[in-house]
Amino acid sequence: MNENIMDKIVSLSKRRGFVFQSSEIYGGLNGCWDYGPLGVELLNNIKQEWWRSMTYRDDVEGIDSSILMHPRVWEASGHVENFTDPMVDCRECKARFRADQIDESECGNKAFKGRKAEKCMQEGKFTEARNFNLMFKTFLGAVESHEAVVYLRPETAQGIFVNFNNVRECSRQKLPFGIAQIGKAFRNEINTKNFLFRTREFEQMEMQYFVIPGSDEEVYEYWKHERLKWWTELGIRKERLRLSPHPHNKLAHYARAAVDIEYEFPFGFGEIEGIHNRTDYDLSQHTKYSGKKLEYFDDSAKQRYIPYVIETSAGASRGFMAFLCNAYDEDEAPTAEGKTEKRTVLRFHPRLAPIKCAVFPLVNKDGLQEVARLITDDLKKTFNVFYDESGAVGRRYRRQDECGTPYCVTVDYDTLKDNTVTIRDRDSMKQERINKDLIRNYLVEKLY
Ligand code: GAP
């Protein structure tokens, strides 16, 4: 894998409708991306898989809290004071850099393409580092005054902490239990980079697991293991994953222990999920700032305490990019003339694939289209299915390989005689004949 592969993935993403630049016709908006018809299916499938694995269990409840929250939330959480990155400006080209990432950055002057920003720093072109808060500000209501300032949430977690009492009371959960949510988060990153990796608007899939103090280290290990398993069960290659514990001096202001799950992208390893032991930091802070007790009464021990929190925080958009890079492959496929041709294939786990099955009539006559249409309409009640009657069948296979469609069904003249179709597997390219009434069961078996 190399940078060249990344370029191919970005270009395929646009060509096939996975990802577009935001506001492209106006020249784009830095750090923001739009998901196209295939992209939104992939993203939804990732989120659905996460939701299924995290909330369809007895000890985790789901919520969906609002993006705008009371401004005191962010004072209590420490984000107003601590959610900053050190920033420097180049006096000459006016580019802005994260002071802790200068070694990875290039000079902002296009005329000096490839020049390391470090060199400009050594030449004394940079200002002193200043702290820059990453939260986006806006105003609630019609008056743009200091009192009306609210923030676009930089993490979904706080919506969970402030709802701790609500969820515990309505669900009657006892410790340990978790609250999960998926939602947009916003960070005014100083430098965005690497396609979807560091953006200003993105989605998180977070779960806060509330535990008895003292059991936190064991539960932290449990979730580390569970989350690693989730990524690999959905096809992420083990050799492209690693765990990267945070050294003590690099821990976030709220964390006692933290580990990143990192994926090896074409440009190198990068975090896709963080697992943190947040102790009782957040619930204590919200208790202090709101005056409302966020605690738990342990019936059996007859004790009242503030639970500790183990957090799993995955990026849906970063996960999207990891699944896309992980799926990208090039190999050879046989042609109708008995030769081979290069093919690009996205080897998504079938559950993540945007289209589950494509249906083709072999030729566009003698009633084959009508049968293929009927099969498509019937399967569409359960799956995202694509009907395609244009071009040679080989071309249609190539198009579906590029979208990652795991199965293609072809209706031919035998279908009219014996009700069978061919079903072709994306990865092995092998075909088998099955009765057309069994396609749904076949797909269900392969998918679940
Ligand atoms: N609540 C804890 C928290 O937000 P984080 O490590 O700052 O922790 C968690 O973020 C995850 O959110 C990251 O692992 C990453 O997947 C995603 N993420 C964070 N910043 C991002 C950005 N600017 N663009 C895309 N994804 C981002």
Image (spheres, rainbow, N blue to C red):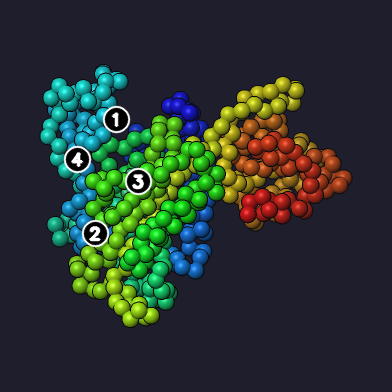
CB-based contact (under 8 Å), mark 1 and mark 2: no
Give the number of the disc on residue 118.
none
- Mark sitting earlier along the chain (1/2): 2
Percent coordinates x, y for residue 204 in the rendering: 39, 52
Q: How far apart, in angstroms, are the residues tagged by discs 1 and 2?
A: 30 Å
Residue position marked by numbered label 4 in the rendering: 86
Q: Nearer the viewer, mark 1 or mark 3?
A: 3
Instruction: Locate residue 368: give its quadrant.
Output: top right
Q: Earlier in the sequence, mark 3 or mark 2?
A: 2
Q: Is mark 3 within 8 Å of ligand 1?
A: no
Amino acid beneath label 4:
Pro
- Count of numbered circles on the image: 4
Question: Which callout, 1 or 3, points at the residue further toward the start of the chain?
Answer: 1
Image quadrant holding the C terminus, namely bottom right
Mark 2 — residue? 77
In terms of sequence position, does the residue under pointer 3 or pointer 4 come before the other? 4
- Residue at horizontal 65%, vertical 56%? 381
Q: Secondary structure at mark 3?
A: strand
Judging by the rendered image, the residue that carries numbered circle 3 is 245
Q: Which residue is mark 1?
A: 104
211 vs 252, left or right, is right
Closer to the eye: label 3 or 2: 3
Residue type at mark 2 is Ser
Residue 365 placement (x, y as % from top left): 79, 38
Residue at 84 percent of width and 45 percent of height: 416
Distance of label 2 from label 4 (alpha carbons): 20 Å
Q: Nearer the viewer, residue 228 or 248?
A: 248
The residue at 19%/38% (across/down) is 87
Q: Earlier in the sequence, mark 4 or mark 1?
A: 4
